Amino acid sequence: MKFMLTALLANALMMTAAPAQDALHRFEVVGDAIPSSLTGAPGDPARGRAIVLKRENTCLLCHSGPFPDERFQGDLSPSLAGAGARWSEGQLRLRLVDASRLNPATIMPSYYRVDGLTRVAPAWRGKPILTAEQIEDVVAYLATLRE
Ligand code: HEC
């Protein structure tokens, strides 16, 4: 009985641990970009805009952008206006996934990384800040910011 309980518990633990391990889709970095969509499909710009504006995702703590209705916008970083003209989708994707690969001293969070983070509360360990789908939505939205 005791053995069965242990086995059941171990099983339950493995089941909760498993999604964390394959939480990240594989991706390939080429130069300063991730050329292919993380999900294999294009994102949705309207959903991406909502993600950028959502306070919890903290983009606007650091960035400003073409958001006339947002009263508080950051000035620690380049404005997001024109980001789609300055960068290709692949370059935008790598900047969101892990900006520290381009600038090890950056203050921008790595939105799609689980390893190497030391100050993560237990509930968030093993989970990226944004899902692959959300990254693609934000890439699709930023690509529309041409001026
Ligand atoms: C804590 C501050 C911070 C947060 C939060 C942050 N960024 Fe950044 N971001 C930066 C800084 C600083 C740079 C400039 C490059 C560098 O230092 O890495 C940057 C660069 C960028 C760039 C390239 C800008 C350019 O045109 O040169 C994009 C696009 C971008 N961030 C998008 C986002 C999005 C979208 C979010 C939210 C999902 C976000 N950032 C959250 C600080 C931040």
Image: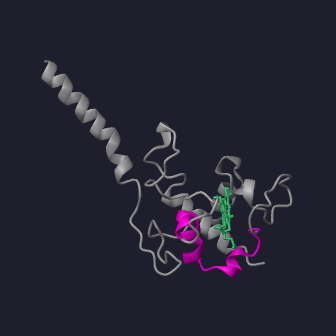
Q: Position of residue 75 (x, y in %)?
A: 80, 61
Q: Position of residue 57 (x, y in %)?
A: 65, 51
Q: Is residue 98 left or right of residue 141?
A: left
Depth order, front residue of 84/43:
84
On whether residue 72 falls in the magenta region, the answer is no
Can you tell which quarter of the image residue 28 is in?
bottom left
| Residues shaded magenta | 79-101
Can you tell which quarter of the image residue 108 is in?
bottom right
- SS assignment for the magenta stretch, majority: helix
Q: Position of residue 116 (x, y in %)?
A: 45, 55
Q: Is residue 76 left or right of residue 113?
A: right
On whether residue 95 falls in the magenta region, the answer is yes
> Quick check: 53 above or below 44?
above
> Quick check: 64 above or below 91?
above
Residue 136 shows in the view: no
The quadrant the N terminus occupies is: top left
Q: Is residue 53 left or right of residue 113?
A: right
| Ligand 1: image quarter | bottom right
> Quick check: 137 above or below 22?
below
> Quick check: 95 above or below 3?
below
Which residue sits furthest front?
105
Residue drawn at 73 percent across, 58 percent down: 62
Residue drawn at 78 percent across, 78 percent down: 147
Residue drawn at 33 percent across, 42 percent down: 17
